[in-house]
Amino acid sequence: MLELSLDGMAQGGEAVGRWDERVVFASGGLPGERVRVQLSERHDAYARGTVTAVLEAAPERIVPRLPGADHIPWQHIDYAAQLRFKRQIVADQLAKIGGLPDAPVADTLAAPHPWGYRNSARLHGANGELGYFAAASRELQPIAHDPLLLPVLNEALADLRMVLRDDSPDEIILRTSETYGYVLAALRTAHGSGADPLLLARRWRTRCAALAGVTVLVPGQAEQVLGAAHLIEELGGIAFQLRPTSFFQVNRAAAELLLTLVRAGLKLSGTERLLDLYCGAGAFMLPLAAQVREVVGIEEFPNAVEDGRASAALNAVTNAQFLAGRVEAVLPKVEAPAEAVVLDPPRRGCHPQAIAQLLRLAPARIVYVSCQPGTLARDLKLLVAGGYSVASVQPVDLFPQTAHIESVTVLMREAY
């Protein structure tokens, strides 16, 4: 057990202090606090642990809504302070990793709803309980009501709990249409577990009026669907057809802010050929299609590509093309021109070959939507070395009460 003072906030959301020439990452702490920390890791250069007692509290500390819930790690921080910390983390990573100490990082845009904003969730089940895995483990933390979820998802989960017996699925995926208010689910159960997910799905649908469909996923077996296989969600004036397992933005109101920033950063004239890399189901490319000559999206997950193509047809978007495959494998086959590019990679950021191909195509503008400041900084360093300048960096809070940080960076080719 250590006693130490905390003086910073790390990218992963842990407060930072120093002990015995080591950096100490302390989950549950805040800069400006004096705390006791129980260490869980010790290394030559750093240690990691959890705050067990706050001896001197920072003014930003508040009472958490759901103490001990690892999936809400910043619920002890006042919301205005969360926004400040997120901006600081982005600026720090760009300076330390990207070599961009003067990057124009704006104040974080607040989410329209700091609580009750998530339109999808992935939970786990065991022994009749539902919940999330604890941080860095597979220990189930049962939860009766998740304050991050939209109310209809909590209602659907309450109904699922009422019909659970000894047949808890291994994984429960939920998605709601915020536009229309109904729910889709997927139940995933390991082969040979003894549970009958199809029977559970039938009981659940009978009880839950909002549950329009359940997809049952068992390894080695064909996918089975009771009811609807897709829902319709609207974003940027486009109706998206989505299955429960397809990636889509979890915070629709904040996603509208993202789309507005992407559109403003691209400054489209109507003549461009736009590339949307890591496009998912087309959350950016389909709303932007009306403002360009042609848009080409690249996405490695086949289900997302299928949903994107279906959404394009549903909305009569005829100038959008989806290409299936990894960006670094498909992009070398894409010929110039590409006057504008949207990048929205997963947390691991862009593959170096994808960056190299971007530099080959040399678009006038790139808008990089990032969910991980460290990999954003790494990729920006390569793009700046390749002839681009960073015009703006705008953090956006898609995930209040957590350390996850979304940001929109606008890059311009120096000769542009």
Image (spheres, rainbow, N blue to C red):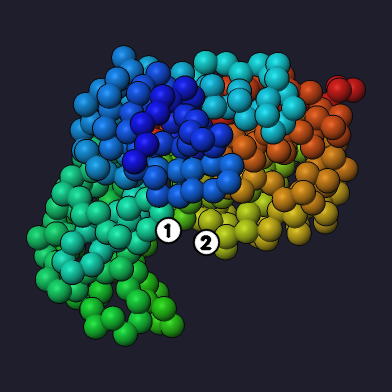
- Would you call the spot at circle 1 few (<14 residues within 10 Å), some (14-19), or many (20 or more)? some
Separation of disc 2 and disc 1 at Cα? 8 Å
* Mark with earlier residue (2, 1): 1
Q: Quick check: can you spot residue 132?
A: yes
Q: Are marks 2 and 1 in contact (CB under 8 Å)?
A: yes
Q: Element at badge 2?
A: helix
Residue 189 drawn at (x, y percent)? 32, 73
Q: Nearer the viewer, residue 34 or 194?
A: 34
Q: Is residue 414 above or below residue 41?
A: above
Percent x, y for residue 140? 27, 59
Q: Residue at x 37, y 72 (%)?
A: 217
Disc 2 residue type? Asn
For mark 2, what is the residue?
303
The residue singled out by tag 1 in the image is: 245
Amino acid type, label 1: Thr
Q: Residue 346 or 281: which is nearer the viewer?
A: 346
